[in-house]
Structure formats: structure tokens, C-alpha cells
Image: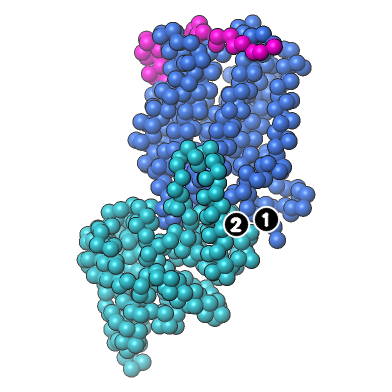
Amino acid sequence: MVKHNRYLFNRANMRAHKFIYIVIVIIILALLPLVVHNPYYIHLLIMVGINAVLAMTFILMLRTGLICLGIAAFWGIGAYASAMLSMGLGLPVWLSLPAAAVITAIVAALVGVLLVKQGGFGFIIQTLAFGFIIVLIFGTFQVFGGYVGIVGISHPEPIPIPFVGSMIFTSISKTPFYYLMLFLLLLMVLVLAAFYSSWAGRAWRAIGLSAHLAESLGMNLFNYRLLAFIIASTIAGLMGSFFAHYYGALVPGSFGPFKTINIHVYAILGGINFPILGPVIGSLIMTFVPEFLRITEGVEPIFTGILMILLVLFLPNGLLGLTHLWPRRGKPSGNTTHPII
Amino acid sequence: MLEAIKLTKYFGGLAAVNELNLRVNQNEILGLIGPNGAGKTTFFNVVSGFFPPTRGRVLFEGRDISRLESHDVAHQGISRTFQASTLFMKLSVLENVFTGYHMSYRTGFLKRVLHSSSARKEEEGFKKKALETLEFMGMASLKDELAANLPHGYQRTLGIAMALATDPKLLLLDEPATGMNLNEKKAVIDLIRRIRDMGITIILVEHDMKVVMDLCDRIIVLNFGQKIAEGLPEEIKANREVIEAYLGKEESKNAA
């Protein structure tokens, strides 16, 4: 008989099968800057990391039945909060980074209490509205720099690393930022994996599969959805803070719902049943393929839109969903359970 | 134990449950029967908190539970099964039952997120209990099968297993024997008796009269949301109004 217990016992699975692979992937990612010298490609890789984490937050909320069109808004709240803390209050970046995450969490909790209760279609429309409102607020109020945006956001302070010297963040070399992105990416994956493999992850999954049944077993839909919403938004906020201090400049337009749609596409392209690997694959492809095809920024939305329609029509489980088509060792094809990583 | 007082639920202008007074005693099996659309399932939905009642109250162990949401009702010790096989179809049988222990978590939030040894031990305990429940149901050999792949009869039993996992005081069973063959029906009758012997009170909605007459200590008959009869199984069998409700007036005259 086939074993179908991956939902419950993925921790054991992870130790046995995946640990070695994960270590190998981390080593390859860490050595990548030794091979890739072009700073533009390093920049693209950094954006892949940020976008992948954002797409992970989309899947996290989707699992509980929430389709959020305000992910980029929370990404922006983190970015603006961090920029203003370091520029206005003179806070060191290493403090404004976690502080921005906390501020985003508070905003997410307040917004979430109002919006999550409704769920369903109401939630989609209201988060869309929230996404537009945030852009308007950033653009209209001069405190936030208006539509011109904020420039000259400070880079992180150097960190001493034993035996190597110190890691200096400047606009000349992007490699230190790449490593910082890698660190944050791994940290967020760990946080997400810890939640997914715990009681909360099981409850989210149960709610996504059958909300009525989950409720009748005593799960409070509102609480679990709010938890997912706050965790997702906080993670987006933290990545926003990193983006602000990496990029050095913020424009309100980049945090609108169009960005969120792109985030959705990364997740759907990779495969929404793969909450960690799917977003990485999706954002990797969506960042590099338009680059190699030399698609200019003006045309990109058309490309993305057509791709999204095609995906939903012909490949709703994404690229990684195709892995179910070929049989694995000792396992017949058509396995419908979903791994955590 | 459970008491409904003038319970009324309107859908638009239609009274699905109308001024229903009903009482369930400790550790009895109460049968709830009636033609289609009589309001049986609506009664379950109102009691389990899926819809608020339009008027009236539901008391459980003396507490008013009529305005509670369904997860709070579950916490009070009322568990239910669903008419259609509502299961987590993409999860295994064991995982389905495991989910039923959700209310039994006692470790703290951080311990659970950080997978501390006490949190892991707790979940191991749930797994063990889930296996025991499956053994009690006679489904232990199917534990690794996907719920979606189960035969219909086992899907219904799995639904009962999940409801049992929540450790209820009162169990609402919505047509547990639907679509079962004779042997499966016998097994489910035996199972429901054993559940009662564990000290759990049961309200049973069922169309199969043999199952109802075999199992129930008391039967209440609903028609158009109202109670038309109440009594022991033998009394209900002989009740003229009940026969009329089921067969229609003309038919029952012919039958008589």
C-alpha cells in the first residue's frame, strides 16, 4: 500500500531525503558570486530572492483560502518604515530592519482584523483597495517623499566577519547584498517551514481543504487566517526593509497591485503546491527569461498577463506540478499529497 | 443535556425549523426522522453553530449556545458529521483522524512553533490516539490510504472517527448509514451502540427505518420544521400522523 502521510510526518521525511540536497543547494548558491561576475546578474539574483520570499507569502495566505492583492503594499510599508527610521531617526540599519518588520506586523494586525473576517471575495477586493490606498498615501504625503520618492537611503553598516575582515555594503559591489539576501531567504524559509510543519500548518491546510469540517473540529477560522495574514505581511515587510537599504531609493509606484499580480504569477508558475521551492523556481524564471528574451519593461506586463492566462488554463499546478507525471523510486505516479518543501 | 426552546430558523420566508421544542437526555440515542426538507439537517446546522437561529434558544448543559460560532460549539463538546462525505480528501485516513485532536493541544505557542520535545511528544500522543480510534472503528489497516480512495462506507465511518477524536459529549450523526449495504449497516449500528456505551449522547438523523428503529431509545418526527410526533420506536411505528407524513394522506388510507 502507498504511504500517504507526508502532511503529518514531513519532518521525518525531510531529515531522511532532503537534508543533503538542501545543504548542496545552499553551498552552490553561496559560491555563485565566484562564477557570476557581472554585477547586473547579481542584482537580478537579489531580486529573485526578494520576489521568491514575497511569492511564498502569497502561497501561505492562499493555503487558508485568502487571496491577498496587497502583498506589495506590505512590502512597501516595510520599505518606507525602514527608510524613514534610518533617515529620519538615524537608526542603524541593523535596528531599522527588525523594527520595520514589527511596524508592518502591527499594521497587518490592524488591517487584518478588519478584512480577514470577511474572507472570500470581499477580502480580495478590499486588499486590492488597500494596495491602491497605500500607493496614494506614499505618493500624496510629502513626509513620504511624494511621487518622486525617497533617495539616498543608507546602506547597512559593515559587519565584522572573523578571519575574513569586514563585510562592507556599498553601491559599488553587490555581492555583500547578495549574501545578506541569501541569509534572509534562508531565515524566512526556516520560519515558514517551522510554521508549516507545526500545528498551525496543519490547521491552515485543513482549513484550505474544507473550512466547514475544520470548523466543526474546533478550528477558529478567523484566528488561523489572521495568523497567516500577519506572518505573511511581516515577512513581506522585512523583505521591503532589505530592499530599501539595498536599492537606496523608493518610488510609490513599485508597491502597487501590479507588483502583487507579478508575485502571484511567480508562485503559480512554480506551483502553488510547493510553498518554498515553487516561488524560487517561478521568480527565477520570471526574472531571467524576459531578460534573455530582451523583453523591455514596457512590454513585460503583456508577457506576464498572457503567461498568467496560459498557466491558469493549461498548467494550474505550475512547473513543479509536472513532477507528479513521472514515477519516482518505489512510488507510483499520481501522488496527490503535497510536500512542505 | 441539550434543549431546544422554540427554535426557529427562516431561510427567506420559509421556516426550515419552526418553533421546535426538543430535549435530549444524558446518554440516550435520539432519532430525528421526517421526510426530505423536514428541517433535520437545518436543526443540526443551527445546533452546531453554522447558522444562527432566527428565534429561540439552544441550551447545552444549561448554557445558551445558540449564538456561538461552530468552532466554539465544538469546544463545548458537541461534534457532528456531515450528510455528504465531508473529509479532508487529499489527506490519509490517519491524518484525517489526527486533525480531530486539534482541540487537545496544550503546549504553548512558541513551543509548538519551535518543535520543542514536549510539543513533539504531544503530537506523537495524538498519533497514537488516532490509531486507537481507527482500531476501534475497525479501520486500522486503511490508515495510510487517502480518504478520497476509500469506499463510500468507510468514508462515512471515517467521518464518525474524526468526530469522535474531538472527545465529544454529544454527537450529531447526519445519515451515517446512507449508501451502505446490509453488512455495512449492521456494522454501523454496532459501532453507534459502542459509541453510546462510551458515555456519549447521540442524535441520529437517518432515513433507513431499520437503523433508526434498531438503535434509538426515543424518536422525534419532524415535518415542515415542526415536531409532529415524539415517543418510543413502537409508538412512532403505529402513529397515524407519521404514516401520513411519509406516505401522504390518500396512500395511508389505502394502506390502512
Location of the N terminus of chain A (image quadrant): bottom right
Label 2, label 1: how many angstroms apart (C-alpha)?
Answer: 8 Å
Residue at position x 43%, y 12% in the image: A84
Q: Give residue B123's position: percent from left, percent from top.
A: 54, 50
In the rendered structure, which segment of residues is drawn in magenta?
Answer: A135-163
Position of A336 relative to A118 (above/below)? below
Q: Give residue B60's position: percent from left, percent from top.
A: 29, 62
Q: Amino acid at mark 2?
A: Ser
The colour scheme of the drawn protein is by chain
Location of the C terminus of chain A (image quadrant): top right
Position of A103 relative to A334 (above/below)? above
Instruction: Read off the residue under disc 1.
Output: A3
Q: Which of the pair B232/B54 is nearer the observer?
A: B232
Callout 2–callout 1 Cβ contact below 8 Å: yes
Q: Amino acid at mark 1?
A: Lys
Q: Which of the pair B126/B182 is nearer the observer?
A: B126
Q: Chain of mark 1?
A: A
Q: Chain of mark 2?
A: B
User: Which picture quadrant has residue B125?
Assistant: bottom right
**Could you say which chain is coloured blue in the image?**
A
Rendered image: mark on residue B92: 2
Secondary-structure class at tag 2: loop
Q: Is residue A147 magenta?
A: yes
Q: Give residue A121's position: percent from left, percent from top.
A: 42, 41
Q: Is residue A236 magenta?
A: no
Q: Give residue B26's position: percent from left, percent from top.
A: 32, 71
Answer few, some or many: residues within 10 Å of disc 2's Cα (few below 14, many 20 plus, some between 14 and 19).
many
**Chain B tint in image:** cyan
User: Which picture quadrant has residue B218?
Assistant: bottom left
Residue at position x 45%, y 80% in the image: B211
